[in-house]
Image: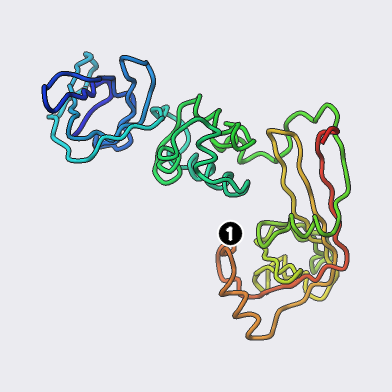
Amino acid sequence: MRAHLGDQLVIESQRTGATRRDGEIVGLHHEDGTPPYDVRWSDTDEVTLVFPGPDAHVRQVEHGRPGTTRGPAQPDTGEAESVSAVAPPTGGPNPGDIGRRVAVERRRRGLSREETARRARISSAYLAYLEEQPAEPTVATLLNLAAALGTTSAALRGAGVDLPPGQGHALLHPQLRDLSPEECRRLLSTHGVGRVAVSTSDGRPAVVPVNYEVVEDTIVFRTAPDSVPAAAVGTEVAFEADHVDEALSQGWSVLAVGPANVVTEPDAVRGLAQHAHTEPWAGGAREMWVSIRPTSLTGRRITPADQ
């Protein structure tokens, strides 16, 4: 089965041949026009993602547009399934990026697909498709997903990725409170991206981001011997990690201060490499592990005053 934008998808009764439902194909997910399609149904004006089954066929419609051609409709053997979706706008973000951001934000908040779909008022089948395939939701669905995940539709689209965080409006009545060492350890969790502050060989201060792990209350990261983060070795350094929630104008930061040393014990190095959650985002050969054992662990959180 192949279709073009503007064609009609018709669902017929296999027993009588009568039309049960039809709608306009308003979105394609594959360049060759194969399913699935985003269809705006004539009876409800709703747009859904459709995997056409044997009871469906494409009715080709000419709109008089220059260069428009139509290929023959072909049978399909899949089962029909319909879930909420929309056609991706031209010039929009790379299809699939939204789904990846949704999946990351959902996992960060500890939500299942079923719970997220329920909150966003979409089917869990479509949420699975969105997270795993190059698809883009409607504006309404995107807004619902953002609300369900406590973020913004712009953040899910990747807007502002080249801008520093925290450009939104401040809370009307903010509350800045100190975090306990236990809260700081929980927020640092097991891994992520943080920043290490060092003094370089020429005596200048530098702050650089690193992918880090937490192993038994010790912060560790991989680097190269001649890199800026390697200047931490043998000195007392500051390490900081944070998170900013642009949608709610709140967030937290944790600061760890302590001595940094190279991990040299072979079994320890091997264990760190085997159990690392991520490769260094900077790439390249980064085989030197640096450990920071905090002697001071402090943090702050900004929330509304009534929380």
Q: Residue at x 41, y 37 (%)?
A: 126
Question: Which residue lies most toward the front here?
Answer: 15
Count every numbered label the image shows and give the total.
Answer: 1
- 245 vs 39, left or right, is right
Q: Position of residue 263 (x, y in %)?
A: 71, 79
Q: Nearer the viewer, residue 169 or 202?
A: 169
Q: Residue at x 52, y 35 (%)?
A: 118
Indicate the quadrant containing the C terminus: top left, top right, bottom left or bottom right: top right
Q: Residue at x 67, y 74 (%)?
A: 289
Q: Position of residue 37 (x, y in %)?
A: 30, 31
Residue holding disc 1:
281
- 258 vs 139, left or right, is right
Q: Nearer the viewer, residue 176 or 223?
A: 176
Quarter of the image for residue 276 reads: bottom right
SS at mark 1 in the image: loop
Indicate the quadrant containing the N terminus: top left, top right, bottom left or bottom right: top left
Q: Looking at the picture, does residue 221 appear above or below residue 93?
A: below
Q: Nearer the viewer, residue 230 or 8?
A: 8
Quarter of the image for residue 164 reads: top right
Q: What amino acid type should be assigned to the residue bearing mark 1?
A: Trp
